[in-house]
Amino acid sequence: MIPTKNKHIIEWVDKIAKLTKPDNIIWIDGSEAQLEELRKEAMSTGELIKLNEEKLPNCYLHRSALNDVARVEDRTFICTKNKEDAGPTNNWMDPNEMYEKLHKLYDGSMKGRTMYVLPYSMGVIGSPFAKYGIEITDSIYVVVSMAIMTRMSKDVYDALGDSDDFVKGLHSKAQLDADNRYIVHFPEDNTIMSVNSGYGGNVLLGKKCFALRIASYLGRQENWMAEHMLILGVEFPDGNIQYISAAFPSACGKTNLAMLIPPKIYTEKGYKVWCVGDDIAWLRIGEDGRLWAINPENGFFGVAPGTNAKSNPNALASTKSDSIFTNVVLNLDDNTVWWEGLDKNPPKNAINWKGEKWNPDDGEVGANPNSRFTSPAKNCPCISKEFDNPAGVPISAIIFGGRRAKTTPLVYQSKDWNHGVFVGSIMCSETTAAATGAVGVVRRDPMAMLPFCGYNMADYWQHWINMGNNIKNPPKIFNVNWFRTDDEGNFIWPGFGENMRVLDWILARCNDELDAVESPIGYIPKSDDIKLEGSGVTKDVLEELLYVDKDLWREEVANIKEFYSQFGDKVPDVLLEELKELENGLK
Ligand code: GTP
Ligand code: SPV
Ligand code: MN
C-alpha cells in the first residue's frame, strides 16, 4: 500500500519506476520489523554479514565493490542552468544534457531488483531547521544505513502533507560501473541522482549530497548556512555549557574532536565535552542575535582506522551495537571486526576488506583506509542532551582546521568575522583516503567545503560575509592545526583528548579572559596560556607549534592569489582587502 497521498511523491515514484523498471516497489516506513526483514534478505545474498550477537548485538559487516570505496570528486557534478553558478571548483554540465545522459544509465537499471522508497528528515521532524527528503534506491545497504544516519520514518509524509518541498534523491547501483559512475546535483530542481556506486558518501543521499551540497544552495537563498562541521559542547565545572562548531576536511579529525575526553587536569575539575554532531551543522541566526546550530544527522558515518579505546573511546563505544561496518577486517574466530589502529592484536584467522583470506604478517592492510562504521548517535556515551532539541545550540566559536605539516600554527584567532571568513577561505589541507585520488597532496579546501559547496565558492564566501553582517553577536573564528610534523614526519602535537587544551584557550578568548599576541595572520596564544601540565609537551615545543614562519606565509600569499584568481572578479572585495593586509603584515 502507498503510505502517502502526496501527488508530487506518487507521480515522481511512478516516473522513476517506469524508467528503472524494478520487479517490485517497497515503501519504507522506518519500522524495526520492516528493517529486520530487509536485513535478513541482505544476509541471504551476502550483502550484509551478521556479526557476533553477544559481542556486537544487531551489528553487520558490509563490503563495497573493490573499485568503490570512497567519494568520487571527479564524478560529482553541480548542474545549474548557468555554468558560473556552479563555479570553477565544481564539475558542471548543462542540466538537460545531464538528465539525458543519466536517463540512459537508469533505463532498466532496477530490472530483477526491488526499488525502495524511503522518507527521511534531516533534523528533528517538525523543527524549524528540518528539511525532508525521499530517496529511491535499489540497495538494502542504503535503506538500513539511512535508518541509522537519518530520521527515516513515515511521519515525514505527515510533516510534508501535500507539499512539494522535499529533496528528490534517486540512487541505483546499476552495474557499479566506475566509468559510468555519477553523483549529480540539480540544486535548481531539489534533485540528486547517483548511479553506479554503492559507497556511503556517494549513495546515502541525505548526507553530503543533500545536507551539504543542496542545503548550502538552499541556505544561501533562505539566509542560513550548511557546513561541514562538528558541533560540541564544553561543560565547565559550574555546569555552564558553551558550544563550538568546527570545520575540518574529510578524515581530518571532526569525529575525534566532537567526542573528545579531556585530559585529567580538566576532568578532575569537572570539565566535560558533549557531542552534538560529528560531520554536518546547519546554522541559523536566532532571535537573540546569536548563531544557532543543529546536527541534521541521526548517526555517525565515521572513519574506522585509528579509532581505538585511547584515541576515541566514545566513538568505539558507539559502534558496539546496532551498527554497520563497511570494508573492515572480519575476525573469523569470533565473528567480530578489526581495523588498523584498533589494537595491536590483528586477528590471525581473518578476511580482509576485499573478502580475501588475510594474514596480518603479509604487510598489506586488512581494512580499507577509508573503512567506516555507521552507528546511531544515541549510542554515543557523550551525546549531548541537546541532540534532539529542535532549536539547536548557540555557537560561541567557529574553528577551521586542516592537516598541514608546516606553515599553519597549532591555533590562532581571526581579528573579526570578516577576517575569519578570509581564514576559512584560505584553508589548506592534505588530501585523505575519504575521496578517490592521491593521498597527502596539499590543496586549498575553503571551509572544508571544496567538495561539498553546491554553488559558486566565491558566492559562498559572500554569503558568509552577508551572514556576519546580520549576526548581532557572532561567534569568534579560529584556526587550528593538530598535524604539524618534525623533520622526521612525526606529529609534534599529541592531539586527540589533548586538543581540549586548545579548546580551553579558545573559549577563554571568547569570554575575554585572556590577552593574545598579535601577528600578521591573527592572534596567537601567549605560550603560558595553553595549559601543558600532563601533556608531555614542553614549552619549547609549544613555541615551535605556535611559530609563524614569515617566509612560508609569503609563499602562502602567492598561492592564495593564484587560488583566488580562478574566481575572477567574483572574489568579495572584503577578502581581497584581507589578503592585502596579510601581505603587508608580512613585509
Ligand atoms: P570524515 O568522516 O571523513 O569527515 O572525517 P573526520 O573529519 O571526522 O575525521 P576523524 O575524526 O574520523 O579522523 C580521521 C583520522 O585522523 C583518524 O585516523 C584519526 O585517528 C586521525 N586524527 C583525528 N584527530 C587527530 C589528532 O588530533 N591528531 C592526530 N595526529 N590524528 C588525528
Ligand atoms: C567525508 O568524506 O567527509 C565523510 C564521509 O564524512 S562521506 O559520507 O563518504 O562523505
Ligand atoms: Mn565528512
Image: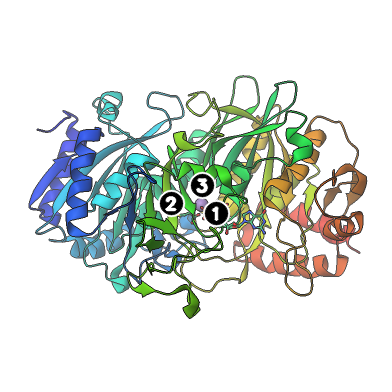
As drawn, is 574 to the left or to the right of 117?
right
Q: Is mark 1 within 8 Å of ligand 1?
A: yes
Indicate left or right for 378 with 571 as reference.
left
N-terminal-most mark, 2 or 3? 3
Amino acid residing under circle 1: Thr
Helix, strand or loop under label 3? helix
Precedes in sequence: disc 2 or disc 1: 1
Label 2: which secondary element: strand
Q: Residue furthest front?
A: 333
Q: Position of residue 505 (x, y in %)?
A: 80, 40
Q: Quadrant of ligand 1?
A: bottom right
Near mark 2 (Cα within 10 A), the count class, few <14, some 14-19 or many ≥20, is many
Residue 206: x %, y % from top left: 38, 44
Q: Which residue is mark 1?
A: 307
Location of the N terminus by quadrant is top left
Q: In which image quadrant can residue 131 be found?
A: top left
**Relative to 256, is 540 above or below?**
below
The structure residue drawn at horizontal position 60% and vertical position 59%, both measured from the top left corner, is 445
Answer with left or right where residue 49 lies relative to residue 495.
left
The residue singled out by tag 2 in the image is 373
Q: Are marks 2 and 1 in contact (CB under 8 Å)?
A: yes
